[in-house]
Image (cartoon, rainbow, N blue to C red):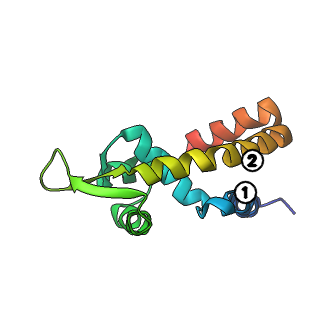
Amino acid sequence: MATCYADTLRLAARKITARYDGALEPTGLTIAQFALLRKIRRAGEASLTDLGRRAGLDRSTIGRNVRVLEKAGLVAMAPGKDQREAAVALTKAGHERLAQAEPLWEQVQTEIEDVLGASGVKSLNRLADAF
């Protein structure tokens, strides 16, 4: 019987997510929150629609996640360039939390690279880009 790639990928994703979440636990961030904060920092300031596009998530999901970060004081909403939609940006606390979390994230990145090897990392990126 053939291995189901979807099942294997979902199992790997759950295990890897748990590893990142465990490493980031001292910062109070999940890997999803950390990734969103990094996207916001890269953008400088972005609308929820733009963040959704960058994250591959719908606007309502991004909105819920941003509200959690806003309540934690890590992001702030401001009028956007387009007055129809607000923009989100990191606060000073958001920048500080990212600085605290990044070395922990880097450790997990290194662990995963060690397991996959250079060719495995390339294959993972190729798979993500293929669909």
| Closer-to-camera residue (108/59) | 108
- Vertical relation: 120 (above or below) 19: above
Q: Find out whether the residues at labels 2 and 1 contact each other: C-beta distance under 8 Å.
A: yes
**Residue at 51% across / 48% down in the picture?**
96
**Residue at 58% across / 61% down in the picture?**
29
Query: Mark 2: few, some, or many residues within 10 Å (few <14, many ≥20)?
Result: some
Query: Mark 1: few, some, or many residues within 10 Å (few <14, many ≥20)?
Result: many
Q: Position of residue 33 (x, y in %)?
A: 52, 59
**Residue at 49% across / 45% down in the picture?**
38
**Residue at 37% across / 40% down in the picture?**
43
Residue indicated by mark 1: 23
Q: Is residue 76 left or right of residue 84?
A: right
Q: Position of residue 44 (x, y in %)?
A: 35, 40
| Closer-to-camera residue (69/131) | 69
> Which circle's residue, 2 or 1, is located before the other in the chain?
1
Q: Position of residue 58 (x, y in %)?
A: 38, 61
| Closer-to-camera residue (101/33) | 101
Which residue is the extreme one toward the left?
Answer: 83
Q: Which amino acid does label 1 sit on?
A: Ala
Residue indicated by mark 2: 108
Question: Which disc, if any, is residue 109?
Answer: none
| Closer-to-camera residue (52/11) | 52
- Vertical relation: 105 (above or below) 62: above
SS at mark 1 in the image: helix
- Vertical relation: 83 (above or below) 21: above
